[in-house]
């Protein structure tokens, strides 16, 4: 998978490439937009200026055409021809001629109308302003004398300008005079003045003859114009860029100019450049945003994938670790099971050992227990033989029944010992508390008696009470507790052991108390620990109470110990009361007695 740095580098390169492409495209688009906008604006400006030029050319041509025809027409008029006659004194009819000139001038709206003799003497004119000037006059007269239409542009010091057309007046085949009509350009210039554009006419010498700007009139164009890349013209006191559209008036050899303002072209170029630049920038920004977004998405996808992979790896590792742990745990469970099994066996063996130890302790006392009836049986048997010899059969029968009683007692003791030494079963059920205590005391009594303990008292509370437990194991509990009491009481004259029980709800509390020295308070919590003993070597190994505690726990009960205020120890066993039938788990029921005396 591509790393984040590689992705960023790739996108950086793409960005640079895109920027270069964008810059080139933008430059092309801007240049193209500017140029096409310029062309459009220029053609627009030129078209409008061209229209103005065409219109003004037509107007000017129309005006000139109108006045061009006037002199030949006037020259043919007989009334005008008649004017060019001198009387005998050589005087001309100047008054009549003047009147005709005035009428013609005002009717044709010409600037002036003048009549000249061929020698250049003026017969008359209507206004007398321009016609009085001599420049151009010879040329006008000469053309007229040659039968042509004379023409000349004229101006005076007052800035008046006109164009004169001349035509010769013929009388009887001879030229007798010349009619000159002066064109008035006032209306033309007045019409031009309405236009925002500069409109002017230059003659072939380059002098501005007509113009809608009065300041330009009769000035040389070279003074009004600075030539360069774009021609600049003097507009309102300063030079400005203008486009010059020129149309030649071939008849007059004049050039009609219309100046167009190129500002719209510059504005169009500027706005085209601005719009194209903005569009390019926008496109560039959109491309950049799209690229950034793509980069972000690619990096995110890569990060997500990396996280997913890491997660997968972690899950895989955890699963592997878990399965290893599982295997280890299974092995540990197996080992623990085996250890528990071993422990259980060891515990069973320990119980057995403890019982054997108890039996060992009791054997001395038991041998005395057996020797006593054996001696009595022997003596009863000897006496029975003697009674038989004497024929006293009733005494023989009495002795034999006593022997029978003694043998029965010995057999009962033997049976209890056997059942006690058997391995206990694991089943639990309702057992008779009184019977079990009697059996235990049957085993313990000989030791008690040997220790000089006269009385083991069993309270009335135990009779008829059933508890949940195992017969042999519960019997072993009482044997252990009574044996411990015997050990503690050894050598005391007032030694006393008491066993009693009371019912509390569905529980039965059995107490085993003695009036011995009790247990030191700091050792109270230790007596149930395995191998805790205060007895000397060969007297105890410290597992009796530990076994008792385990047995009671197996029955779902508890055992506690305390010191009695009046002295001595008190063991309290808390067992579940049982009301069911007596199933006698773990062995055979022995004959019971509610209380027993040693
Ligand atoms: P052992 O009898 O072999 O010492 P036990 O587990 O039966 O082992 O008893 C542990 C200890 O508890 C005894 O050594 C003794 O100090 C103390 N003990 C048990 N019962 C009594 C009792 N009735 N009075 C005083 N001390 C007792």
Image (cartoon, rainbow, N blue to C red):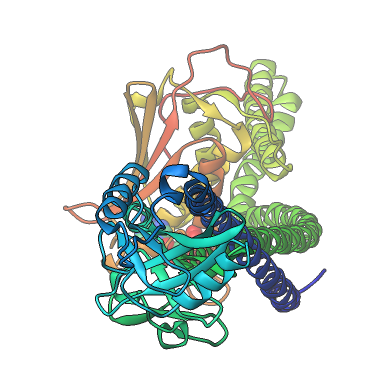
The x, y position of residue 269, in whole percent, is 54, 66
- Foreground: 241 or 342? 241
With respect to residue 358, does 231 lie above or below? below
Which residue corresponds to the image point at 66% horizontal and 26% vertical from the top-left? 585
Which residue corresponds to the image point at 52% horizontal and 42% vertical from the top-left? 553
With respect to residue 79, does 46 lie above or below? below
The outermost residue toward the front is: 88
Which residue corresponds to the image point at 34% horizontal and 52% vertical from the top-left? 187
For residue 433, side relative to residue 337 (left or right):
left
Of the 4 image quadrants, the one containing the C terminus is top left
The x, y position of residue 410, in whole percent, is 66, 36
The outermost residue toward the left is: 566
Of the 4 image quadrants, the one containing the N terminus is bottom right
With respect to residue 109, does 231 lie above or below? below
The x, y position of residue 65, in whole percent, is 54, 50
- Foreground: 378 or 210? 210
The outermost residue toward the top is: 581
Viewer can see residue 533: no
With respect to residue 103, does 130 lie above or below? below
Viewer can see residue 252: yes
For residue 196, side relative to residue 176 (left or right):
left
The x, y position of residue 203, in whole percent, is 51, 75
Quarter of the image holding residue 208? bottom left
Which residue corresponds to the image point at 68% horizontal and 65% vertical from the top-left? 32
- Foreground: 131 or 579? 131
């Amino acid at each position: 998978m591509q790393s984040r740095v590689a992705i960023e580098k790739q996108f950086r390169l793409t960005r640079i490439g895109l920027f270069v492409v964008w810059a080139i495209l933008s430059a092309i688009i801007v240049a193209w937009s500017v140029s096409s906008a310029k062309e459009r604006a220029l053609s627009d400006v030129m078209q409008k200026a061209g229209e103005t030029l065409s219109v003004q050319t037509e107007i000017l041509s129309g005006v000139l055409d109108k006045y061009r025809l006037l002199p030949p027409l006037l020259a043919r008029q007989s009334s005008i021809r008649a004017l060019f006659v001198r009387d005998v004194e050589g005087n001309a009819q100047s008054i009549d001629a003047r009147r005709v000139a005035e009428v013609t001038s005002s009717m044709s709206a010409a600037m002036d109308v003048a009549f000249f003799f061929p020698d250049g003497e003026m017969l008359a004119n209507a206004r007398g302003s321009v016609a009085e000037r001599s420049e151009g006059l010879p040329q006008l007269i000469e053309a007229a004398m040659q039968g042509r239409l004379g023409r000349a542009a004229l101006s005076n010091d007052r800035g008046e300008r006109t164009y004169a057309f001349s035509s010769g007046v013929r009388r009887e085949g001879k030229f007798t005079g010349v009619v000159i009509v002066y064109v008035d350009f006032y209306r033309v210039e007045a019409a031009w003045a309405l236009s925002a554009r500069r409109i002017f006419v230059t003659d072939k010498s380059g002098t501005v003859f007509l113009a809608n700007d009065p300041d330009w009139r009769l000035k040389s164009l070279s003074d009004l114009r600075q030539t360069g890349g774009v021609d600049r013209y003097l507009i309102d006191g300063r030079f400005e860029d203008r486009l010059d559209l020129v149309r030649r008036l071939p008849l007059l050899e004049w050039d009609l100019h219309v100046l167009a303002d190129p500002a719209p072209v510059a504005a169009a170029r500027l706005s085209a450049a601005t719009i194209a630049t903005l569009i390019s920038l926008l496109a560039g920004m959109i491309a950049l945003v799209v690229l950034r977004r793509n980069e972000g998405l690619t990096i995110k996808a890569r990060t997500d994938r990396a996280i997913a992979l890491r997660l997968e790896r972690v899950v895989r590792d955890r699963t592997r670790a878990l399965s290893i742990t599982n295997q280890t745990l299974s092995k540990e469970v197996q080992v623990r099971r085996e250890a528990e099994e071993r422990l259980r066996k060891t515990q069973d063996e320990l119980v057995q050992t403890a019982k054997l130890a108890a039996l060992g302790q009791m054997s001395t006392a038991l041998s005395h227990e057996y020797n006593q009836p054996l001696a009595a049986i022997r003596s009863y048997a000897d006496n029975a033989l003697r009674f038989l010899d004497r024929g006293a059969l009733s005494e023989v029968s009495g002795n034999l029944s006593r022997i029978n009683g003694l043998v029965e007692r010995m057999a009962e003791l033997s049976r209890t010992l056997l059942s006690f030494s058997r391995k206990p079963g694991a089943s639990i059920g309702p057992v008779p508390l009184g019977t079990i205590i009697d059996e235990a005391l049957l085993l313990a009594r000989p030791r008690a008696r040997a220790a000089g303990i006269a009385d083991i008292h069993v309270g009335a509370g135990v009779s008829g009470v059933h508890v949940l437990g195992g017969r042999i194991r519960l019997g072993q509990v009482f044997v252990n507790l009574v044996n411990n009491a015997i050990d503690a009481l050894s050598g005391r004259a007032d030694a006393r052991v008491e066993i009693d029980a009371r019912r509390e709800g569905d529980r039965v509390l059995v107490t085993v108390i003695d009036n011995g020295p009790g247990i030191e308070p700091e050792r109270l919590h230790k007596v149930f620990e395995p191998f805790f003993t205060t007895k000397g070597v060969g007297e105890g190994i410290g597992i009796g109470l530990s076994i008792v505690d385990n047995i009671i726990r197996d029955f779902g009960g508890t055992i506690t110990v305390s010191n009695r205020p009046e002295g001595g120890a008190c063991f309290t066993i808390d067992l579940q009361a049982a009301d069911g039938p007596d199933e006698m788990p773990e062995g055979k029921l022995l004959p019971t007695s509610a209380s027993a005396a040693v």
